[in-house]
Image: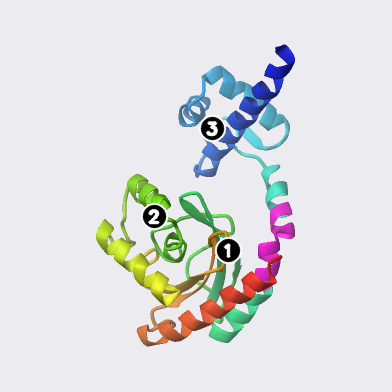
């Protein structure tokens, strides 16, 4: 009985460690022990024990302000960036796309109810704001809509039910019916567009990377309103779909 219980106990410990690391994923500053335990839904003693192991392995760091992600996490991130078949396939396509359009080309991947920036190639004029690799971004704005449009009906319902705010950068909101109608249009066109949704004055066009198992990645070009006038969007939509297909064909 003791031997059979050991794997289950080890698995629970692993899951709890991941829960704690995910708390740091969503934080922008150091956290106190009690706050980490609350967010992870774990007892303080358990949280402290796991943090001690993670700190010893360099996955978290601690100072007078509390705990924060450790430099050891960079190793795993670098290994992913270096070995990902998707990224290896996308890099030359993004370079060609940025050169051809003069716009900043980016690759995103959906993770749960968010998307993450995996790669970026600057266009002729670099963006006025940062778009850091690894940043967690919403699915209901910008390129996220190209990914949200690929969800199943059940996934989409779950996503919308948990969405706290459907607010753009300018403070305007879109109700559920309008959002669902927009996603339907995105499916028909094969690409999405956004103007001032995440960053004022910025426009983007995005297309999902085809995948028989369900699209979870998208490619996007971004520029100012002047760079991406309304009458240029259909042409960019075609270019984005071609780029997305090229990435899919290059990915093993």
User: Nearest the camera: 42 or 218?
Assistant: 218
Residue 108's place in the image compared with 233, above or below, is: above
Image coords of residue 28 (percent x, y): 50, 44
- The numbered dot on residue 65 is 3
Dot 2 corresponds to which residue? 153
Q: Earlier in the sequence, mark 2 or mark 3?
A: 3
User: Nearest the camera: 241 or 188?
Assistant: 188
Q: Around disc 2, counting alpha carbons within 10 Å, would you say few (fewer than 14), some (14 to 19), or many (20 or more)? A: few
Dot 1 corresponds to which residue? 212
Per the model, the C-alpha gap separating discs 1 and 3 is 47 Å
Q: Quadrant of residue 119?
A: bottom right
Residue 226's place in the image compared with 115, above or below, is: below
The residue lying at 59 percent from left, 22 percent from top is 48
Residue 83, magenta (yes or no)? yes
Per the model, the C-alpha gap separating discs 1 and 2 is 17 Å
Per the model, the C-alpha gap separating discs 2 and 3 is 43 Å
Image coords of residue 16 (percent x, y): 58, 29
Q: Give the residues drawn in magenta, as a range.
A: 79-91
The residue lying at 64 percent from left, 36 percent from top is 60
Q: Around disc 3, counting alpha carbons within 10 Å, would you say few (fewer than 14), some (14 to 19), or many (20 or more)? A: few
Mark 1 or 3, closer to the camera: 1
């Amino acid at each position: 009985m003791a031997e059979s219980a050991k794997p289950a106990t080890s698995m629970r410990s692993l899951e709890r460690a991941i829960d704690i690391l995910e708390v740091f994923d969503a934080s922008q500053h150091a956290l106190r022990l009690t706050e980490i335990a609350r967010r992870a839904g774990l007892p303080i003693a358990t949280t402290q024990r796991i943090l001690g192991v993670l700190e010893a392995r360099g996955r978290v760091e601690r100072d007078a302000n509390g705990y924060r992600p450790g430099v050891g996490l960079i190793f795993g991130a670098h290994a992913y960036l270096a070995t990902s078949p998707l990224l290896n396939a996308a890099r030359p396509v993004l370079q060609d796309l940025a050169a051809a359009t003069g716009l900043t080309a980016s690759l995103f991947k959906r993770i749960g109810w968010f998307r993450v920036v995996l790669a970026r190639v600057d266009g002729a004029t670099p963006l006025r704001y940062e778009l850091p690799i690894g940043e967690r971004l919403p699915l209901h704005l910008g390129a996220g809509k190209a990914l949200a449009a690929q969800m199943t009906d059940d996934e989409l319902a779950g996503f919308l039910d948990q969405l706290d705010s459907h607010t753009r950068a300018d403070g305007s909101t879109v109700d559920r019916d309008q959002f669902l109608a927009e996603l339907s249009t995105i499916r028909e066109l094969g690409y999405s567009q956004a103007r001032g949704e995440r960053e004022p004055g910025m426009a983007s066009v995005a297309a999902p990377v085809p995948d028989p198992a369900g699209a979870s990645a998208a490619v996007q070009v971004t520029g100012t309103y002047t760079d991406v006038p309304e009458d240029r969007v259909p042409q960019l939509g075609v270019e984005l779909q071609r780029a997305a297909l090229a990435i899919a064909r290059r990915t093993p």
